[in-house]
Image (cartoon, rainbow, N blue to C red):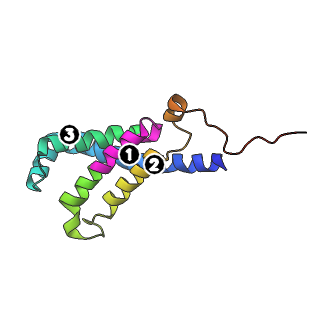
């Protein structure tokens, strides 16, 4: 059963990671950080230059780390903060549904947070930081 759980945790990390990488790449390569900062300023996002860099790097690097399973709790929290900003500062006034609604950033933020703390064993974190676990049930005794 653990293999199934770990497989689907990886699939979740892969899906959310791909979405994050695409959005980070778009901000850095397609639009450029200057244009993103200018757009953020037009939307009254505080500290638009810093916010543009934060969003782009968290999305791009965070997406890669999420897929690899590296520093998952940190990535989950950083992505959740990024998406909370997107929800509160941009999408909330448009309601829940797309095209401008907050459903996508809400789903990405919550999923990244959940996967950050429950990302499964198929991760670099598991290989690097795995703790020895004590058995939950006592071993059977033979007499």
* Mark 1 residue crowding within 10 angstroms, few (<14) / some (14–19) / many (20+): many
Q: Residue 102 carries which label?
A: none
Instruction: Say which element carries label 2.
Output: helix
Residue at the location (58% across, 46% down)? 6
Q: Which residue lies under the disc numbered 3?
A: 53
Residue at the location (32% across, 50% down)? 80
Q: Which residue lies under the disc numbered 2?
A: 115
Earlier in the chain: of badge 2 and badge 1, it is 1
Question: In the depicted view, which residue is nearer to us: 72 or 34?
Answer: 72
Q: In this view, does 81 lie to the left or right of 119?
A: left
Give the CA separation, mark 2 to mark 3: 23 Å
Residue 37 in view of the camera: yes
The reply to whether dot 2 and dot 1 touch (C-beta < 8 Å) is: yes
Residue 91, quarter of the rendered image: bottom left
Judge whether 15 appears above or below 34 on screen.
below
Relative image position of residue 86 (x, y in whole percent): 24, 55
Relative image position of residue 137 (x, y in whole percent): 71, 45
Residue at the location (10% across, 47% down)? 38
User: Any magenta on residue 75?
Assistant: yes
Judge whether 105 appears above or below 52 on screen.
below
Q: In which quarter of the image is the C terminus?
A: top right
Instruction: Say which element carries label 3.
Output: helix
Question: In the depicted view, which residue is nearer to us: 132 or 140?
Answer: 140
Q: In this view, does 65 lie to the left or right of 28?
A: right
Give the CA separation, mark 1 to mark 3: 18 Å
Residue 32 in view of the camera: no
Identify the residue at the far right of this view.
143
Earlier in the chain: of badge 1 and badge 3, it is 3
Q: Residue 76 carries which label?
A: 1
Question: Which residues are the magenta region?
Answer: 66-81
């Amino acid at each position: 059963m653990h293999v199934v759980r770990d497989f689907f945790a990886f699939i979740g990390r892969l899906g959310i990671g791909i979405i994050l990488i695409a959005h980070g790449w778009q901000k850095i390569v397609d639009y450029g950080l200057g244009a993103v900062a200018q757009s953020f300023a037009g939307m009254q996002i505080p500290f638009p230059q810093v916010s543009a860099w934060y969003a782009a790097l968290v999305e791009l690097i965070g997406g890669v780390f999420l897929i690899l399973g590296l520093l998952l709790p940190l990535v989950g929290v950083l992505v959740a903060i990024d998406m909370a900003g997107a929800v509160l500062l941009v999408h909330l006034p448009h309601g829940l549904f797309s095209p401008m609604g907050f459903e996508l950033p809400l789903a990405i933020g919550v999923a990244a947070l959940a996967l950050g703390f429950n990302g499964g064993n198929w991760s670099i974190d598991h290989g690097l930081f795995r703790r020895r676990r004590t058995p939950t049930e006592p071993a059977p005794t033979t007499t």
